[in-house]
């Protein structure tokens, strides 16, 4: 059971309130997409779930366990960023295994988990390469691989495809959908791309200035937006 429950989650930076008391339930295995204008707090909300930022109010549970004050490494979450953040001096294999090495996993287990992840992501042939010898899509696969090897219950994606060209974005989107199906993990995905949101999501969360405007299935938001703001995000191409 790895659903998520956010209860009145708040975040301020100094005296600036960025997240204003968010209530949200995400079911185990659900694919949830956060959309909203730049600066509305999508990344901050993901970082709060990951534990990369501390909440300034409310609480947050994963799989029924309150993790509000739990260290990121112990939350069972893994995050994939837009900027890959790969280590340039390490090979693909080392990049994928590094987190496990740091947390003291035995070498044989690391090798096995890396092998499994690279097979899922078609990276087998590239394990000995350094990031600079990879294409953008391959780098993003490695970044996803690094999350998979940790076997998290919850995957967090922060605009993972926005640095890729349009064709590759479509291909990677299909791969992420397949990954979700194969792993059955809970996933939260931030995107600017309306098509990504509509095709990947079980549930879309529309954010505006640190507040949830509406939550629902892609179809329900499309057919029945609560207001013009939601309609503008979901109903019409931008
Ligand atoms: P989004 O991902 O939706 O574009 P963010 O979550 O990155 O938005 O940012 C939401 C708001 O919080 C913005 O106004 C941003 O400037 C502010 N913010 C984010 N991180 C910090 C930080 N570390 N310190 C101060 N302000 C921040
Ligand atoms: Mg962001």
Image: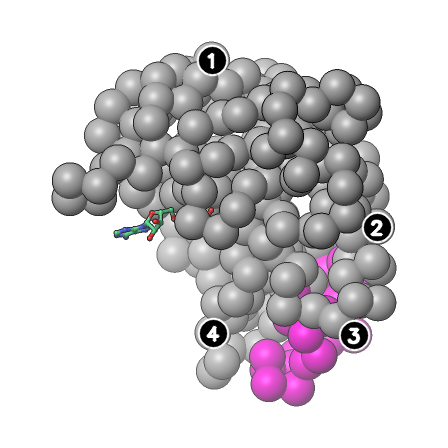
Which type of secondary structure does the marked residue at label 4 adopt? loop
Name the element at disc 1: loop
| Colouring mode (rainbow / by chain / secondary structure / one colour) | one colour
Which of the 4 quarters of the picture holds residue 146? Answer: bottom right
For residue 179: magenta?
no
155 left or right of 120? left
Q: Nearer the viewer, mark 1 or mark 3?
A: 1
**Looking at the image, can residue 143 be seen?**
yes
Disc 4 residue crowd, few under 14, some 14–19, many 20+, Cα 10 Å: some
Mark 3 highlights which residue? Answer: 125
Q: CA distance from mark 4 to mark 3?
A: 19 Å
Q: SS for tag 2?
A: helix
Report the span colored magenta. 118-140
Percent from the top left, x then y, of residue 24?
50, 19
Quadrant location of the N terminus in the rendered image: top right
Q: Under 8 Å from ligand 1: the CB of mark 1?
A: no
| Image position, residue 220 (x, y; %) | 77, 20
Beta carbon at label 2 within 8 Å of ligand 2: no
The secondary structure type at the circle numbered 3 is helix
Disc 1: which residue: 64
Residue 62 point in image, percent of width and height: 47, 22
Q: Main secondary structure of the magenta part?
A: helix
Residue 31 figure quarter: top right
Residue drawn at 51 percent across, 34 percent down: 207
Please give the label number shown on residue 174. Answer: 2
Residue of label 4? 87
In the rendering, at what x and y percent does residue 175 appear? 81, 52
Q: Are marks 1 and 3 in contact (CB under 8 Å)?
A: no
């Amino acid at each position: 059971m790895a659903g998520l429950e956010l209860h009145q989650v708040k975040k301020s930076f100094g005296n600036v309130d960025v997240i204003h008391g968010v209530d949200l339930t995400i079911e185990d295995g659900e694919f949830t997409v956060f959309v909203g204008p730049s600066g509305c707090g999508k990344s901050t909300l993901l970082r709060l779930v990951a534990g990369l930022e501390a909440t300034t109010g409310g609480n947050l549970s994963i799989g029924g366990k309150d993790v509000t004050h739990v260290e990121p490494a112990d939350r069972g979450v893994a995050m994939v960023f837009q900027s890959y953040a790969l280590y340039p001096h390490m090979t693909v294999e080392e990049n994928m295994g590094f987190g496990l090495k740091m947390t003291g996993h035995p070498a044989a287990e690391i090798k096995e988990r890396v092998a499994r992840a690279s097979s899922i992501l078609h990276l087998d042939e590239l394990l000995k390469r350094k990031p600079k010898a990879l294409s953008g899509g391959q780098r993003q696969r490695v970044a996803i691989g690094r999350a998979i090897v940790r076997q998290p219950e919850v995957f967090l994606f922060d605009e993972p495809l926005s640095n890729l060209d349009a064709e590759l974005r479509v291909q990677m989107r299909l791969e992420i959908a397949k990954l979700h199906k194969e792993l059955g993990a809970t996933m939260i995905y931030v995107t600017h791309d309306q098509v990504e949101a509509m095709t990947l999501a079980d549930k879309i969360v529309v954010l505006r200035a640190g507040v949830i405007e509406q939550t629902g299935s892609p179809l329900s938001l499309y057919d029945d937006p609560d207001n013009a703001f939601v309609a503008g995000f979901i109903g019409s191409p931008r």
